[in-house]
Every structure is written in C-alpha cells, then in structure tokens.
Amino acid sequence: KVSVYTATTGRQDPHQIQARPSLIAKARGADLAVCTGAELEIGWLPAVLEQASNPRLSDPETGQFEAARFIQLREKPAKLDRSEGDIHAEGNPHIQTDPRNVLTVALALSQRLAKLDKANAAYYMARHSQFSTRFSAAIAKWEADAAPLRGQKVVVLHKSWIYLEEWLGLKRVAALEPKPGVPASSGYIAEVLSQLQSQPARMILQAAFEDGKSAEFVSERTKTPIVVLPFTVGGNEQAKDLFSLYDDTIRRLKEAMKP
C-alpha cells in the first residue's frame, strides 16, 4: 500500500548526506517523510523539506515521522558545546543497532500510516502484527546465539554502538575518537594503546562506511581483530533486510571470538 523512496544508502555516513535536487523533487510528491531523528539528519533534511515546499510534510505530527521520538535515547550530553565534537543534544541517534528498538518504531509507524490512510488502517495493523510476531521470534534467536558475547570487552571507532552494546552485554573500554567526529591525534591513540595494555579488548567495532585507518593502526599493535559491521540495512551485501542485518551482525561478532 506504500510507495517508498529511500534517500540514503547503508554505505553512506548518515551525518554527511547532501540535500540534492533529486531528494527535493521526491519530497515535493511525498505524503510522509520518515527519518531517524534526534538530529541525525539535521545537516540536510530540513533543507530538503524547506525547498520542497510540500504542505503535506509541513506538520511534524502528520507529515514527518521521527523514529527516535519513540525510543529512550542513550548518551545524552551533559553540556551542549561544539568543542565536544559532533554531539547530538537529544542523545545517541543510532537506535537501529538494537532490534528491540525496531519493534517499538514499527508499531508507531504502523499507527501513523493507519492514521494517514484510514481506508487501509486495518491492513497496516494486520501487517504490523505479522511482522511483530516474526521479528520477536528472531530477536529471541539472536539473543540465544549471541550469549557468548555477553561481557566481552570492545573498542569502537565511533560511538555508534551504545544500543548494540546494551542489547548484547558488550563492554566498551575505549573509543578511537577523542570526541564524536573528531579524528584521533597520535597522542590520543598512544593513550588508547596504553589503556589496552591493562584492559585488553576482544575486538574493535567499525561501521562499514567508516575510514578504518585508526582501527587498523590499533589492531596491528594490539593484535585485536577488527569487526566491520553493516550498521544498517544495505551496509554490506549480506544485510539485505532487517532480518539479515542482525543475522550478519551476530555472525561477524561471533567469528571474532574464535581463537
């Protein structure tokens, strides 16, 4: 019942999208704009909506859907200061790394579609019920498969993984950015290497779209494997949909556990 145009791909840095004329043209004909929210798209989506001048998208309560509004966000900054790097005032927006958040968002989105398209409301809610049943069963399987990961120490390239960490019980011991979006200096990397001598990590987590130079440098010196995760649907060839996204994520994390 829905025609979908996806503005971004899983191989793009979600912070660095451009407000292209093609996006503006698509927004002119849309009934609903769906995004993560929590300022993840603040660098481009407001410009797209403004230039599209589409009255259907002007009301945030009907024409705009921000998934993060329905999630308890983590890592809210104690102070709002640009010197702290690319911080998000509302909290960490990378909610899709925990599939339980997807279940919550799926219900909210289904309810919004039912509200906008009342003639097909029952259809949307029935489809949601089917998805929720399948996805809940998949989450239970992923959690059982990932049990050996609980308590494992990890290093992250960018602080994108708090929801994955909490879901699977991973313990972050270091980040390879001193502040979000700020490249690491040689001095900062030296501090991380010193820290990892006393607190070794089992793996280094990197999103598929990220430049992994600092991860490679640390990996070579600590013999810690790098795990490149798809991060979102389309992040690699295996992550074709929500189900295969988490299948591939769990598989890659468990592979790093092997001797």
Image: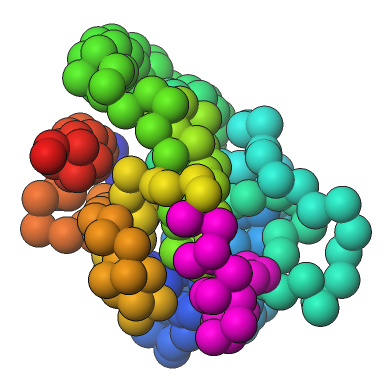
- Compared across the picture, whether 185 is left or right of 11 comes to right
Drawn side of residue 42 relative to residue 154, left or right: right
Instruction: Please provide the residue range marked out in magenta.
Output: 177-197
Asked if 16 appears above or below 156 in the picture, the reply is below
Depth check: give the residue in front, 128 or 253: 253
Q: Can residue 77 be seen in this view?
A: yes
What residue is shown at x 29% (from left), y 18% (from top)? 147
In-image side of 218 versus 90 (left or right): left
Q: Position of residue 2 (x, y in %)?
A: 31, 44
Residue that appears at 35% across and 55% down: 204
The residue at the point 46 percent across, 79 percent down is 17
Question: What is the residue that sits farthest to the front in this orientation?
Answer: 198
Q: Residue furthest bottom?
A: 21
Rendering coords of residue 203 (x, y %): 32, 49
Q: In the picture, which quadrant includes the C terminus?
A: top left
| Res. 237 image quadrant | bottom left
Give the quarter of the image for residue 127: top left
Q: Does the magenta stretch include residue 190?
A: yes
Asked if residue 207 shows in the view, the reply is no
Where in the figure is residue 75, as x and y percent of width and height? 70, 45
Residue drawn at x 20%, y 19% as measured from the top left: 145
Check if residue 41 falls in the magenta segment.
Answer: no
Most foreground residue, 200 or 248: 200
